[in-house]
Image (cartoon, grey):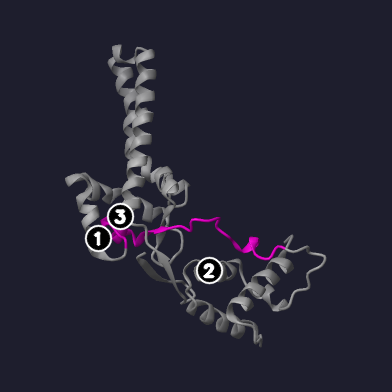
């Protein structure tokens, strides 16, 4: 599977699997099918309301319930579904920034605007060619927005609060200095742990381990993966209820 190496704000490199062109095409077709079924429902309701017998009513309802949803479907869902549309969600793919963080609203708008070029000419061939040639899974809209589309893990996504859930009354934290870390730091650690688990990328664990030890003044002989899992577990235990 083709991957892209992104550099986080902590200067750590993590490999993400790129969404295949096939996955993106299927996601696009699913979204178009949803729109088609929605249009059929709206038209049936308009026929039932005899809206087509009133030109002003027909134009108004058509703009509100047909034209606008068609125009803003992708933009709306990507903003409110964190880089996904129903089609992307079904195919387990997601839009992210090239540094691995969620795309901004501005980024989604750029992708939406340039979709006219990507998909408006030659049936989407422009987008397919640019994605295939570019090597970063980017169509023209992604290049302008600084985004790409990645494949999410097939199994349940694990976040920092899911790691080593233990009774608060029985667990004794190993490194109490972890309270100096931010939620963002823990998210980066968890992302590196997930990448190691899913794709075997080990180097980010070593880099982050050295950074955490330096930040907190910790000396430990634990292997990087075990050390970072302990850091996350300690953080969850010490910050629980805050």
Mark 3, Cα crowd under 10 Å, few <14 / some 14-19 / many 20+, is: some
Query: Which segment did they paint magenta?
Result: 137-165
Residue 217 location (% of width, % of height): 65, 86
Q: Which mark is residue 21?
A: 3
Q: Residues within 10 Å of mark 2 (few under 14, many from 20)?
A: few
Whether residues under marks 2 and 3 lie with C-beta atoms below 8 angstroms apart, the answer is: no
Residue 110 as seen in the image, left or right of residue 171: left
Q: 184 or 29, which is in the foreground?
A: 29
Q: Which mark is residue 197?
A: 2
Cα–Cα gap, marks 2 and 3? 25 Å
- 190 over 207 or under it: above or below: above
Residue drawn at the location 24% of the way across and 53% of the way down: 127
Circle 2 — which element? helix
Residue bearing the label numbered 1? 132
Relative to 151, 115 lies left or right: left
Residue sitting at x 48%, y 72%: 200
* Magenta-colored stretch includes residue 223: no
């Amino acid at each position: 599977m083709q991957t892209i190496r992104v550099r986080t704000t902590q200067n750590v490199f993590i490999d993400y699997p790129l969404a295949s062109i096939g996955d993106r095409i299927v996601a696009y077709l699913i979204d178009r099918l949803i729109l088609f079924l929605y249009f059929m429902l709206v038209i049936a309701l308009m026929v039932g309301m005899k809206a087509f017998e009133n030109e002003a009513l027909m134009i108004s309802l058509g703009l509100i319930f047909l034209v606008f949803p068609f125009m803003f479907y992708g933009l709306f869902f990507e903003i409110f579904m964190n880089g996904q549309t129903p089609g992307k969600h079904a195919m387990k793919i997601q839009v992210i920034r090239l540094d691995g963080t969620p795309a901004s609203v501005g980024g989604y708008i750029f992708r939406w605007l340039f979709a006219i070029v990507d998909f408006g000419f030659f049936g989407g061939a422009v987008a397919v060619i640019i994605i295939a040639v570019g090597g970063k899974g980017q169509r023209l809209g992604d290049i302008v927005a600084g985004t790409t589309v990645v494949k999410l893990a097939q199994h349940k996504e694990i976040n920092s609060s899911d790691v080593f859930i233990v009774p608060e009354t029985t667990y004794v934290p190993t490194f109490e200095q972890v309270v100096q870390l931010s939620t963002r730091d823990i998210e980066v650690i968890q992302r590196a742990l997930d990448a190691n688990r899913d794709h075997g990328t080990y180097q980010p664990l070593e880099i982050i381990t050295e950074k955490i030890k330096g930040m907190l003044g910790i000396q430990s002989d634990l292997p990087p993966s075990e050390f970072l899992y302990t850091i996350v577990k300690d953080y969850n235990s010490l910050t629980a209820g805050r």
